[in-house]
Image (cartoon, coloured by chain):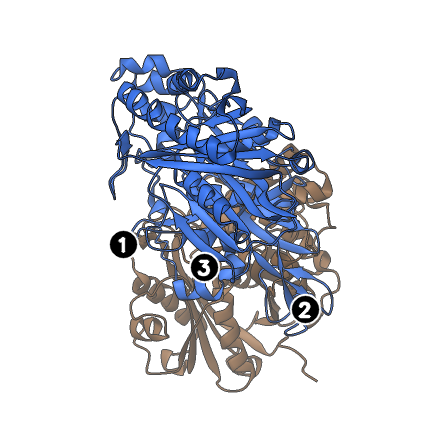
Chain colours: A brown, B blue
Amino acid sequence: MAKGIKDKVAIIGMGCTRFGERWDCGPEELMVEAFSEALSDSGVDREQIEMAWLGLFMQEQSAGKSGLPLSMSLRLPNIPVTRVENMCATGTEALRGAVYAVAAGACDVAMAVGVEKLKDTGYPGLPERSKGTFDDLWLPNATAPGAFAQLASAYQAKHKCDASDLKRAMAHVSVKSHANGVLNPKAHLRREITEEQAMNAPMIAAPLGLYDCCGVSDGAACAIVTSVEKAKEMGITDMVTVKAMQLAPSNGFEMSTTGWDGSYLETTRIAAGRAYQEAGIKNPDKELNMTEVHDCFSVTELVVMEDLGLCDEGQGINAVLDGKFDKDGQVPCQIDGGLKCFGHPIGASGLRMAYEIYLQLQGRAGERQLNSPTMGLTHNLGGHPFRNVASVSVFGLHAA
Amino acid sequence: MSYGILSFGAYVPALRLDRKAIFGAVGWAAPNLRALASGERTVANWDEDSITMAVEAGLDCLNDVSSTVDHVSMISTTFPFADRSNSGLIADALNLGTDVGTEDLAGSRRAATSGLSRALKTGASSSLLIASDCREAKPASAQEMSYGHGSGALLLGEGEPIAEFLGSASEHEDLVDQYRSTGADYDYSLEERWVREEGWLKIAPTAMANAATAANVKLSDIDHFVVHGAIGAMKGLAKTIKVDLSRFEDNLASACGDTGAAHPFLMLASSLEKASPGETIMLVGFGQGVDAVVIKTTSALVGMRAKKGLKKFMERRRSTENYTFYLSLRERLGLDFGLRAERDNRTALSAYYRKRRDINSMIGGRCSKCNALQYPLSIVCVSCGASGTQSEETLSTKLGRVKSFTEDWLAYTPSPPCIYGNVEFDGGANVMLEFTDFESGSVSVGDEVRLVYRVKDRDDKRDFHRYFWKPAPLISA
């Protein structure tokens, strides 16, 4: 009987670039920057890294859809490099590959790198993409904000809440993340905003205004992992281990049937349930000290709080407005500023979230350091509410 | 059981352009248009063309009709495709099966009456005739004022006709009152008085007299004349054939405009909505000659017409006084819609061919094991996981209900905002669809919607466009 991934693998080094409009950097510079920080953080030599996973979603950067961009940029000694993509869960998928390789005993030290160079596409938002030869024939030419805005309309209809209450709670989500981002030197947007600014911003896809949407940026992040035994041999204290890594892709239930009412994220609920079981978590809002969730849009974060069991269904508005997920709240969310302030270079985001949890657990988060956290969660939602890939991961101190 | 007209249908787009707005915008260049600047004209939305309007008229015509259709004719001077069966697409959209005959008829504004006359004389098979035209007009031209967009349909066959065929006659003369050469954008029109004197008042009376003779009725005994000419031509014609102008059907100039090859059927639909059983109607088509067709309504008309015809579509209006909006919708004005409008809309036609039933007829799958309806039809049932259990069921004629939606100001559409959302259908299916004909602020979760066949995307690089179904506001019958 498999026992899951809990406490088998330690993260021994992480790196993360400054996210933003990095006009002077390509994927190569970004990957090298993240890797250099992770390597010096890890205490291993580059020759000790035996396998690598590259998370890269959108473009055929440099040498195309393969492991080559990473191998070439870092001049790796011909070790296996696997490229993965799973929409916005891409970065987490790269980490999952590395973690599973170590857990399987296939290698002692593995690496995950996530990168995305979005600002060369020419688009201010995410670029237009084909949905495939069949889906292009019938699915609307939806944008990400338009797809997620529907969460708001369905949530509002289901819970019969006032549109202005929902809009105010959404504004609070963004105000909170901006306040957190100000303290983070690696964030793209480092400016406080007010609730009024958020509520009165130009409409992008009703009811999502400009400040309800995360930014678009360039960035890379990197993790180096090894087995708990090896980490102990290395004498690592404050060891951060993987408690759970779960993934749930849609199967068509949401978009093809009336069984889903559009007001929540089915796959997030499934992935969270499995992750809590794997990590042995029974009361998430009491056992988790922080979360980094997929706040591509403010309403997504609000709904995800319910789907992760951090507040009751239908209570998202109240919990958000009561400050439960603020920096000084019960379960701080996006303590690093989130996608809201980092932007969303797709392949990098999952690893960027893990980077913040890793720093916080080790007490290295500077001005934004929380009070002795022991367990944190990351969440990605790739695709649209009606068809997506959800990942939920839990990281904690080895002792926790 | 006898052969005749079994049903009729019509359609005009919801959008209406106030003619005063046209004059307000172009009157500085064409002050003579002031005389035409009253009333309004129908305007096809950006995603409508003669095919989509034909599907609407076809659905209206086939509504509540049990007879099978053996043959579909599309009649137009503005076929979207010069070499691709336009009527074949329509037959698919109407879900008529692959064994129906299809043909495209063109070449004249009287192509519809010519096709009708021939079909009625032959009386061979059950035929659906749909006339549809979407003529563009040069900005500041008289045609921009007088034209409209619309379609009309007639179903002929054995059964209980709403109107019987009495007789018809035709004259052909190469009087070039107007023409459009192959590939040209606009019609070129000649002097109206010449057309009236030499055309309407000399050629039409001959054909009309011959048709009356063929029908064995006196011209003066005919109850209604459906004549798609300008009011001047109709007045002159009434005087020439010595009948009162009140027997001439309204040419819809003030509220709709002249819909070209569709106009005889559109006006006939309007006439059939009001006519009493046992009345004779002479339908006249004009264009390098004249067709005249005489029919007689039956008692079946009254029961059949309750949910059909033009009136409900005329009453459903979305009026605009925004001339540049109209120009842009009809691709007469190239606005900068930004980077997202540059998307390459190439259609993988081999993929389309595999999925043509899903796309054209909006065929979903009904699982024989768990009864779940789903779109698109798939090999493995989304609800119970059974494999190969789904049978075809079309969603195109079902009402939908809005589950969630947004008004997206970022996504490209020629008519912002791009409204789309998840729509539920009775039986358990949910489909995410782009909406059409809704204005900003007019959609709510829970609203009922009907599906309409529309242009989904245009591929300007390859001069192709693809069609799909979209939720639109309900029409109150």
Identify the element where label 1 is drawn. loop
C-alpha separation, residue under disc 3 versus residue under disc 1: 31 Å
Q: Nearer the viewer, mark 3 or mark 1?
A: 3
User: In the displayed image of the protein, which residue is found farthest to the bottom?
Assistant: A106
The answer to the question of whether label 3 and label 2 lie on touching residues, with beta carbons closer than 8 A, is no
Which residue corresponds to mark 2? A274
Comes first in the chain, label 1 or label 2: 1
Pointers 3 and 1 within a single chain = yes
Q: Amino acid at mark 2?
A: Arg
Q: Nearer the viewer, residue B151 or B210?
A: B210
C-alpha separation, residue under disc 1 versus residue under disc 2: 42 Å
Label 3 marks a residue whose chain is A
Q: Picture coordinates of residue B462 (x, y %)?
A: 30, 54
Which residue corresponds to mark 3? A131
Label 1 marks a residue whose chain is A
Identify the element where label 2 is drawn. helix
Which residue corresponds to mark 1? A24
Identify the element where label 3 is drawn. loop
Image quarter of the N terminus of chain A: bottom right
> Badge 2: how crowded within 10 Å, few (<14), some, or many (20+)?
many
Residue A86: which numbered mark, if any?
A: none
Pointers 3 and 2 within a single chain = yes
User: In the rendered image, which quarter is residue B476 located in?
Assistant: top right
Q: Amino acid at mark 1?
A: Asp
Residue A240 in the figure: left or right of residue B329 = right
